[in-house]
Amino acid sequence: MPRPLSGRAPLDELTTALRRVAAVKAALELEVFTQIANDNRSLPAFCRATGLSERAARLLLDALANMGLLVRTEFEYTLAPTAETFLVKGKPEYLGDVLVAQWAWDARGQTARAVRGNKPLNAWLELNRNLPRAPQTWYDPHAAQAEFGAVWEQIEFEFAPNAALNVLAFGIEAGLRALGLLQKFTRAKLTVLDHAAQFARLRPLTEALQLQKRVVEQAGEWLGPLPEDAYDVAVVDTLTETRSIEENIGILHNAHEALKMGGWILLRAAMEEDDRRGPGLVPLWALDLLLSTVDADVYTRTEYRGMLEAAGFFEVRPVGERLNLWTARRLPPPPPPPPVADVAPDFIPDPIVFS
């Protein structure tokens, strides 16, 4: 092994991450976690079920145990909680296919070409907007609900506790988070606007929470016509990052016109800080937009504020210290300034002063 040099740790971590990805990708392709879940826990039993040699199987299983995805004892391997939840085929939370698709995406290997040409190499988002979006955008529903339970409490709504609110969600990701609003206001109803193929992902959650009678699935485009002055709250989530500023203003204006006077909008997006240094991995994720969209960009918080104001909203405010949320309201425009009653006289110099 080469001698470690000071300051090299971030580069070594990248190499280690590649090795880990290769190990997990191989395990998913060989259905390692599914085989162990089917009681093939000892090394001989695992090899009989998979047809692998003991040497090759042992090396892979030990690497997975070292990564914390398996638990190794003297005689067998068992699944760690993460692997048991997300990496066993047949479970509703299974993410294996999503991970393999992410790691196999050949466009990432040509990032330099995309930067050089400023053109997408795989314009999936542009060509397949009416198909289910990549499942990696579908957040852990329980974590999302826990997160937004606190958000709905932070926003200073002026609604009575028993208000029969009409809520409009642009996209099923927005619908997921709006379910918490239905739990807060027990007479509220939710309309989720998205392409028909998306609703299969939201439906199990509404049924599990027994909210299906209060949720309406409406297939359609976010720029399509909507009832005017019909909704009290609109939620926009995970749409604006893949569209141009002009398209985003159009979507937000559509939401503005659908709201009642005094209504609220909540906008959630991956927003960069104004210095474009973060937060988190947002700048790194932005390269995916370069690879897969024609003109989408990562927008700053100030740019999102400008989009909301251009769409007609007032009182654009953050939600606490959160960097990815704005609220705004549909309000009457402020009155024009009063007309000037008196016209200032022309300036006539005093001849005595200037003599």
Image (cartoon, grey):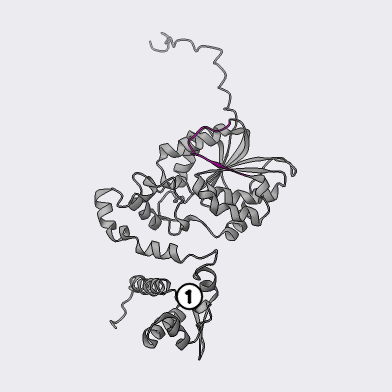
Number of marks in the rendered image:
1
User: Quadrant location of residue 283?
Assistant: bottom left
Q: Position of residue 184 (x, y in %)?
A: 69, 49
Q: Is residue 321 visible?
A: no
At horizontal 61% and vertical 55% (from top left) the residue drawn is: 205
Q: Position of residue 84 (x, y in %)?
A: 54, 73
Q: Nearer the viewer, residue 328 or 120?
A: 120
Q: Nearer the viewer, residue 35 or 59?
A: 35
Label 1, on which residue?
A: 33
At horizontal 42% and vertical 12% (from top left) the residue drawn is: 353
Q: Position of residue 247 (x, y in %)?
A: 43, 38
Q: Would you say 25 lies left or right of 120 here?
A: right
**Circle 1 SS class:** helix
At horizontal 37% and vertical 84% (from top left) the residue drawn is: 56
**Label 1 sits on what residue type?**
Phe
Of helix, strand and loop, which mostly describes the magenta segment?
loop
Q: Would you say 76 lies left or right of 184 here?
A: left
User: Label 1: few (<14), some or many (≥20) within 10 Å?
Assistant: many
Q: Nearer the viewer, residue 349 or 152?
A: 152
Let me know if residue 222 is in the magenta part.
yes
At horizontal 38% and vertical 58% (from top left) the residue drawn is: 284
The residues colored magenta run: 216-227
User: Quadrant location of residue 341?
Assistant: top right
Q: Position of residue 81 (x, y in %)?
A: 55, 74
In the picture, which quadrant includes the N terminus?
Answer: bottom left
65, above or below 335, in the image: below
Q: Is residue 185 visible?
A: yes
**The furthest residue to the right:** 162
Q: Would you say 185 lies left or right of 82 here?
A: right
